[in-house]
Image: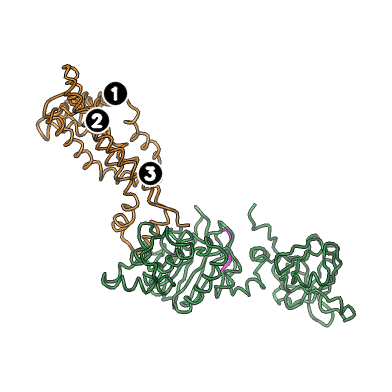
């Protein structure tokens, strides 16, 4: 007798055609983002859930229903799984109207109800008045809304979104983000969102799962994953640039810290790391703070570091700086508001004095991030 | 104007279309979406009637229909008559000759349907039959219509294979193309001209229909 799961539970593994070794859980009302680079298996996992791809082995359970279980020989067809899938291309039926697309997914309802329910769903995604239009007569954002309405038309047990915002412009995307946020508050079903955009995942998801070469490396809240990556590979995948190696040492006063390129760093070192052990550490750019010139006389805060600006990239309101620090093979990155960079006349070659906030400094097991990256 | 030959040609063309349509749909869908070993060889074999001289094709069909072949023997055992030089033989030959005309337009039309659209239909809970009737067939309709029209027109105009397999038996195997040839042999140019005009008109209409329906109905969503 299989145990009942609330929400969606997936565990799949295979060697070919795409290697997979993934496990995800998504509770009703929760949005889980699958994040990873192209080819990391995100969409394949979504297709496994929808029944469009059968993994070599594994189990997929939604609520009390087992959809896939290789040990029990269960592999239900897409028709027998109640999923609502929004494809990256939307995959609308080009010969049907918006309403026709939505009602096409309502074979489980009596024919007399379908038209009314289809109009309700189109109203819910703000497409009232466009029911008779065909996909080619709709904008990208409108097509995406039809795809969402069609996915919901099946009264699914799980909603699957495969990079649903990748084909629309930035303005439309921001609008669709807000609409999806509103919509998910009203849906008490698990939502799995595939995206390669970390900011999108952080904005829309309750938790995110980092995927690499088909493996789920870490799952947690977006803040956890981005500030406390499990290892250097996850750090590189969530765009944490400041990843270095160090050794755990005992500091004065009986506390432990890190020895990094001849410097001693204050940090919270978890107890499972032994003193003397080689570790990796990272710090988000927001954890690298610039010491203000007008307060040059104030005592150093934790972990002072001096360096010279070796790269300066201004993108709108943010300026990203690479700081070359003596003895370091890689630069230390920090981000400032552009107006501060301009006020302090920071440019290439400027000498800077920064602090590494001990609370933002995260210690990880040592592992070369390059080991896991694509050649 | 040989009315009997015209009626026989129309009967042959209609029967060819009706019988080839389901076969063509099944084969075209399989070739469009299934990946199997030897697929290219199957495609090449099905396209062979396009390039093979009609006399060569007619020769092999005649051999296959003969009393010495398993097919000819089986047909004779079942019906008591021979397959060669009969309407049934002509029909079988017509089916073989028209395979590429029936399959290729349909295959191209099915190939033009994005995989995601078919997957979306399955995720919408539609049964395979419903996906075929509600999604695939409407989207591939232009290709299916082109295939039917081309097959019909090509059967009306087929000459070499018909002459090899069926000869020229009035009311049985003498089609309008053979009748035109017979009229010319008999120096009846006006009789040949009337029938040639009928065939010309049929072909023109067929090509016009095929061209007007050849615009793809599947557009990218973006």
The percent coordinates of residue B19 (x first, y second) are 22, 41
Q: Chain of mark 1?
A: B
Task: Classify mark 2: helix, strand or loop.
Answer: helix
In the figure, the orange chain has which letter? B
The percent coordinates of residue B45 (x first, y second) are 34, 34
Q: Residues within 10 Å of mark 2 (few under 14, many from 20)?
A: many
- Foreground pick, A12 / B162: B162
**Which of the two discs, 2 and 3, sits closer to the camera?**
2
Q: Residues within 10 Å of mark 1 (few under 14, many from 20)?
A: some
Name the residue beneath numbered marker 1.
B56
Q: Which residues are magenta?
A: A209-213
Name the residue beneath numbered marker 3.
B108
Instruction: For the residues labelled 2 and 3, say whether their Cβ atoms are less than 8 Å apart.
Output: no
Q: Furthest residue to the bottom?
A: A253
Residue A75 visible? The answer is no
The percent coordinates of residue B199 (x first, y second) are 23, 31
**Which of the two discs, 2 and 1, sits closer to the camera?**
2
Name the residue beneath numbered marker 2.
B157
Residue under disc 2 on the same chain as residue under disc 3: yes
| Location of residue A218 with respect to B46 vertically, above or below | below
- Distance Cα–Cα, label 1 vs label 3: 28 Å
- Foreground pick, A59 / A71: A59
């Amino acid at each position: 007798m299989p145990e009942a799961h609330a929400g969606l539970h997936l565990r799949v593994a295979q060697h070919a055609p795409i290697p997979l070794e993934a496990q995800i859980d998504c509770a009703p009302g929760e949005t889980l983002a699958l994040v990873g680079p192209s080819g990391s298996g995100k969409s394949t996992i979504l297709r496994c859930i929808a029944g469009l791809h059968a993994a070599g082995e594994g189990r997929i359970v939604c609520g009390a229903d087992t959809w896939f279980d290789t040990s029990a020989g269960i592999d239900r067809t897409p028709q027998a799984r109640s999923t609502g899938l929004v494809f990256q291309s939307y995959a609308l039926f080009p010969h049907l109207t918006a309403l026709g697309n939505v009602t096409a997914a309502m074979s489980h309802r009596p024919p007399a109800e379908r038209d009314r329910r289809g109009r309700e769903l189109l109203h819910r995604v703000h497409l009232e008045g466009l029911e008779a239009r065909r996909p080619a007569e709709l904008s990208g954002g409108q097509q995406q809304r039809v795809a969402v309405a069609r996915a919901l038309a099946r009264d699914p047990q799980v909603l699957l979104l495969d990079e649903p915002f990748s084909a629309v412009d930035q303005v439309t995307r921001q609008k669709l983000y807000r609409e999806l946020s509103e919509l998910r508050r009203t849906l008490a079903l698990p939502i799995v969102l595939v995206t390669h955009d970390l900011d999108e995942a952080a904005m829309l998801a309750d938790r995110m799962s980092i995927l690499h070469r088909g493996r789920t490396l870490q799952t947690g809240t977006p803040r956890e994953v981005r500030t406390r990556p499990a290892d250097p590979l996850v750090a590189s995948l969530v765009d944490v640039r400041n990843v270095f190696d160090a050794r755990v040492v005992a500091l004065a006063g009986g506390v432990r810290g890190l020895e990094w390129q001849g410097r001693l760093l204050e940090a919270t070192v978890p107890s499972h790391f032994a003193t003397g052990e080689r570790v990796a550490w990272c710090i988000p750019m927001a954890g690298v703070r610039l010491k203000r010139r007008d307060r040059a006389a104030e005592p150093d805060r934790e972990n002072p570091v001096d360096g010279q600006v070796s790269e300066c990239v201004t993108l709108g309101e943010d300026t990203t700086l690479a700081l070359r620090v003596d003895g370091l093979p890689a630069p230390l990155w920090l981000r400032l508001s552009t107006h501060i960079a301009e006020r302090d006349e920071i440019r290439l070659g400027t000498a800077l004095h920064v602090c590494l906030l001990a609370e933002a400094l995260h210690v990880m097991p040592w592992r070369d991030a390059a080991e896991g990256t694509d050649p | 104007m040989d009315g009997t030959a015209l009626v026989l040609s129309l009967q042959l063309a209609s029967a060819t279309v009706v019988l080839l349509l389901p076969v063509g749909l099944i084969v075209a869908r399989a070739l469009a979406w299934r990946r199997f070993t030897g697929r290219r060889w199957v495609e090449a074999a099905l396209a062979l009637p396009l390039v093979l001289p009609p006399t060569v094709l007619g020769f092999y069909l005649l051999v296959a229909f003969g009393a010495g072949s398993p097919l000819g023997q089986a047909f004779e055992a079942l019906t008591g008559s021979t397959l060669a030089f009969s309407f049934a033989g002509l029909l079988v030959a017509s089916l073989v000759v028209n395979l590429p005309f029936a399959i290729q337009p349909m295959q191209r039309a099915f190939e033009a349907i994005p995989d995601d659209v078919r997957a979306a239909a399955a995720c919408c809970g539609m049964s395979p039959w419903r996906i075929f009737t509600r999604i695939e067939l409407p989207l591939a309709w232009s290709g299916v219509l082109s295939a039917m029209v081309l097959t019909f027109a090509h059967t009306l105009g087929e000459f070499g294979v018909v002459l090899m397999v069926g000869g020229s038996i009035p009311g049985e195997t003498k089609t309008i193309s053979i009748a035109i040839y017979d009229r010319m042999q008999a120096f009846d140019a006006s009789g040949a001209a009337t029938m040639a005009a009928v065939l010309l008109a049929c072909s023109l209409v067929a090509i016009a229909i095929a061209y007007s329906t050849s615009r793809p109905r599947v557009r990218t969503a973006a």
